[in-house]
Image (tube, grey):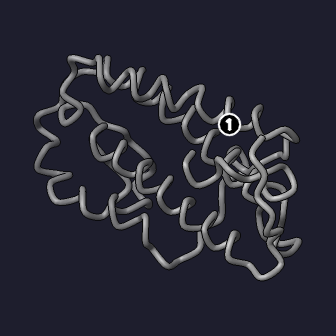
Amino acid sequence: MKEVEGFNEEQIHFKPDISQWSIAEVIEHIAVYEELLYWDLLNNQYTNERPDLIDTVKGVDSTMIAYAIDPNKGQAPFAVQPLGRFQKKADLLNFFNRYRNEIIKLIEETKVDFRLHFIFRPVDWGVWHIRDLHQYTLLWIAHTDRHLNQIKRIETNPNFPKHKTKE
């Protein structure tokens, strides 16, 4: 929020080239993931505790955190690709904050030990196959950091509109 607070609509919709996302598209992408994270955390906190899996994911925290600076460019799955739904910055930020605020509230208020509840994905995902909810949350924090760095790179593009106007 701090990184984009002074940007105007022209700036958030600037694209370095046609193959790259604008700041608005990056934020929309993160916001869609926020909704997915919220529902995964909300629902999986009610699964059975699995202390038998703790050793399986021990040491994976660092992998989740390292995702923030992973130099490999990913390809967003179809379901989380930005659609360009928001022309107004205020609408975009409201969309972003909707689930971000719910996630913060959920984490602050839950009595559940996120280390005892797990997310499962296909076996061929390797280390990403089984994660506890704590690691899953770390991953999405890293995901946001990764895209914050992307926003900063867009801003440093020589063609980025330089005038900042408060809205």
* Residue nearer the viewer, 4 or 34: 4
Q: What residue sits 84% from the left and 38% below the top?
A: 88
The part of the image, by quadrant, that contains residue 67 is: bottom left
Instruction: Residue at 37% x, 52% y: name it.
Output: 129
Q: Which residue is mark 1?
A: 93
Q: Residues within 10 Å of mark 1 (few under 14, many from 20)?
A: some
**150 w.r.t. 43: above or below:** below
- Image quarter (top left, top right, bottom left or bottom right) of the C terminus: top right
Image spot of residue 12 (x, y percent): 78, 55
User: In the picture shown, does residue 51 fall above or below 3?
Assistant: above
Give the residue furthest to the bottom. 158
In x, y percent, where is residue 130? 32, 48
Q: Nearer the viewer, residue 56 or 43?
A: 43
Q: Is residue 90 left or right of residue 30?
A: right
The amino acid pointed to by label 1 is Leu
Residue 43, quarter of picture? top left
For residue 65, what is the image quadrant? Answer: bottom left
Q: Would you place residue 114 above or below residue 130 in this image?
A: above
Residue 25 picture location, percent across and down = 75, 52
On the rendered structure, is 160 left or right of 143? Answer: right
At 63% from the left and 73% from the top, the residue drawn is: 153
Task: Say which residue appears at 55% left-offset and 49% top-offset.
Answer: 2
In this picture, residue 127 sits left or right of residue 146: left
The N terminus sits in image quarter = top right
Does dot 1 land on a helix, a strand or a loop?
A: helix
Query: What is the number of callouts on the image?
Result: 1
Q: Position of residue 23 (x, y in %)?
A: 72, 57
